[in-house]
Amino acid sequence: MATEATATADFQSPDFRPVPQPPDFHPEILVKAHDGLHFWQFMIAGSIAGMVEHMAMFPVDTIKTHMQAIGSCPIKSVSISHAFRSIIKTEGTAGLYRGIAAMGLGAGPAHAVYFSVYETCKKRFSGNNPNNSLAHAASGVCATVASDAVFTPMDMVKQRLQLGNNTVYRGVLDCVKRVFREEGIGAFYASYRTTVLMNAPFTAVHFATYEAAKKGLAEISPDSANDESLIVHATAGAVAGALAAVITTPLDVVKTQLQCQEQLRQLLQLHSVGVCGCDRFKSGSISDVLKTIVKKDGYRGLLRGWAPRMLFHAPAAAICWSTYEASKNFFHELNDSANNSGTIT
């Protein structure tokens, strides 16, 4: 009888273990959701997310660019409010959106590459463990190397338009033509190496933090594991964006200097200020730019613009990931409807 009772207890014990079940079931949900989309669907979702993110946060990016660029000369350091008032006073509200066309042209294709490469690499690197943070970080690095090759030229155009006014460039096309004619095609990729070196750690921290934060937030309420809410994606994205932004600010300052050094020289000459150190650096190396910034402004110069950068990336990442995940959910439902109706997608 004792043996029979023990066997009965052993047989019934799995039914009384509800706590271990959600972790075992949760990864299966994530893998199924990932495999349910086609490559082109990841590209469209990423393109939409990138354009929505950058267009919404463009004024903050303009302020950040002004703060970082102005800091290259022995001019008094400016705050966020000072940079904002300066732009409004000299160019009006339109000054906050100068270069937004270049951003729109670059953000869509770049983010299409960004997210599709990330999802492809994540699937390949994760194997049977979709919660592998190292795989997420490595996938983010691969994504940024590919997407920056698409985005860097238009980012350079965007930043020059942000710093200039109609006395320098009349628009995106005029900027592209003049830079190509006066400086050559290399000017469009002057900061590519720095951009990749900056964005590699940025995306590694960003994606690893986002996936971990999303998983952690979802586990707070395991009963809703199948229905991740908008607040989970937004919160996880904001945390990931803010952390990654602060860590990589020094390299972002270097990138801005390399992209805008010629533009700064032209602006200063137009206003009869002289070059005052804003002429070309001795070389285009990252170490040379770092030494120059530290020599002129000290180590605090490497953190110039960190506040607007964080204020940009935290909500930007929240907007981007929320839009991206919403777009993915739309395609999941579209694929499910097509499969149920027998239509091949």
Image: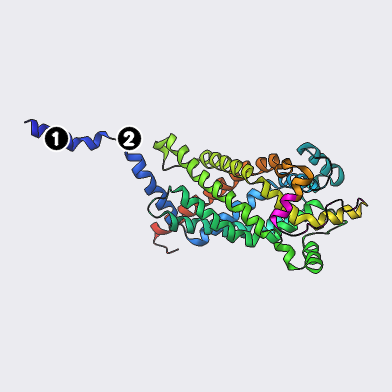
In the image, the segment drawn in magenta is 273-291
Answer left or right for 224 relative to 263. left
Answer left or right for 60 relative to 271. left
Image mark for residue 302? none
Q: Residue 267's image quarter?
A: bottom right
Along the line of sight, the residue nearer the viewer: 83 or 57? 83
Is residue 285 visible from the viewing direction of this image?
A: yes
Image mark for residue 8? 1
Q: Residues within 10 Å of mark 1 (few under 14, many from 20)?
A: few
Which residue is pictured at 71% across the width and 61% down the height?
190
Q: Amino acid at mark 1?
A: Thr
Image location (x, y in percent) of residue 277: 84, 52
Image location (x, y in percent) of residue 54: 66, 50
Is residue 36 visible from the viewing direction of this image?
A: no
Judge whether 238 appears above or below 146 on screen: above
- Quote the CA–CA distance across marks 1 and 2: 21 Å
Q: Which residue is mark 2?
A: 19
Which residue is pictured at 53% across the width and 51% down the height?
327
Q: Quadrant of the N terminus?
A: top left
Q: Is residue 140 magenta?
A: no
